[in-house]
């Protein structure tokens, strides 16, 4: 089975650099989404799952440092590579302390940027593979290979669909996922507007895994958009 196309969120306001980077990333097989200001970047990074964020520091409306900080505070763990024209050590330290994974100073060689992008994606794939069979959040521990779930040490019975739904949430933690997406990826059929299938299964997961299902801590509703797993 071919590997899924890796998705990059490119956040840059310099038009010529946008064109250069987008063309090169796409020629390397990446799917690229472009945002040119910090507020739009924060919204996009929160709303949709990406494999990597390439984030300029000097942006209109909200600078890259603030975007990086806000993404991490919202639980978004997508790898972030920061770009900046600044070369001072203090700026690199600030970016890394705010949660950036790597830092590249302009002007840079394209081959170095591509090498760093691939290194971050490779590290992310390795971490995902290591975490793919088991996952823990709060008092809950899940072993996806054996389909065993425990909460505070006690076994929890989940249906096959509930296990698949939970796994999808875990694999996309921090991102908002819509009902149509869940129906397509978990159930495997196109969404029917009147169905409440997803809501029923989410309610069941909350009942079994949340300390207070009426005020969920981990599987939260994003009104008008869908759900977000914050574990």
Image: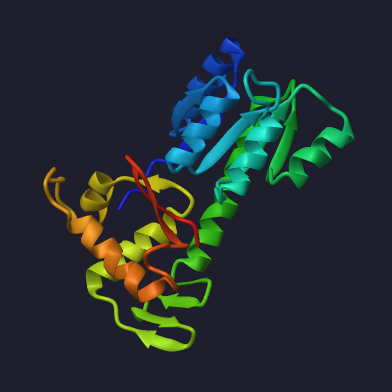
Residue 171 drawn above or below residue 82: below
- Of the pair 167 and 132, the residue shown nearer to us: 167
The answer to which image quadrant residue 180 occupies is: top left
Name the residue: 59% across, 26% down: 38
Provide residue 192's location: percent of width, then percent of height.
12, 45
- Of the pair 153 and 147, the residue shown nearer to us: 153
Residue 33 drawn above or below residue 13: below
Left or right: residue 182 versus residue 177 is left
Answer whether residue 55 is visible to the viewer in this image.
Answer: yes
Name the residue: 60% across, 21% down: 12
Name the residue: 70% across, 25% down: 109
Residue 212 drawn above or below residue 36: below
Answer whether residue 112 is visible to the viewer in this image.
Answer: no
Left or right: residue 151 versus residue 164 is right
Provide residue 13's location: percent of width, then percent of height.
60, 16
Provide residue 147's location: percent of width, then percent of height.
33, 78
Provide residue 172's location: percent of width, then percent of height.
42, 53
């Amino acid at each position: 089975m071919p590997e899924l196309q890796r998705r990059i969120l490119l956040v840059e306001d310099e038009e010529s650099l946008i064109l250069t980077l987008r063309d090169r990333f796409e020629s390397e097989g990446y799917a690229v989404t472009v945002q040119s200001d910090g507020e739009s970047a924060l919204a996009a990074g929160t709303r949709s799952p990406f494999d990597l964020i390439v984030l300029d520091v000097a942006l209109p409306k909200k600078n890259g440092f603030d975007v990086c900080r806000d993404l991490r505070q919202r639980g978004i763990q997508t790898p972030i590579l920061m770009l900046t024209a600044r070369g001072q050590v203090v700026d690199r330290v600030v970016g890394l302390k705010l949660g950036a994974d790597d830092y590249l100073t302009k002007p840079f060689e394209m081959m170095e940027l591509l090498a760093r992008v691939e290194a971050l994606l490779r590290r992310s794939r390795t971490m995902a593979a290591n975490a793919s069979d088991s996952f823990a959040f709060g008092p809950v521990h899940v072993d996806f290979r054996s389909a065993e779930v425990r909460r505070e040490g006690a076994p929890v019975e989940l249906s096959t669909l509930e296990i698949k739904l939970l796994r999808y949430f875990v694999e996309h933690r921090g991102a908002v996922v819509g009902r149509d997406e869940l129906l397509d990826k978990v159930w495997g059929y196109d969404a029917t507007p009147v169905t409440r299938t997803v809501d029923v299964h989410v309610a069941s997961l909350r009942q079994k895994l949340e300390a207070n299902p009426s005020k969920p801590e981990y599987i939260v509703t994003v009104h008008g958009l869908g759900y977000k797993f914050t574990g």
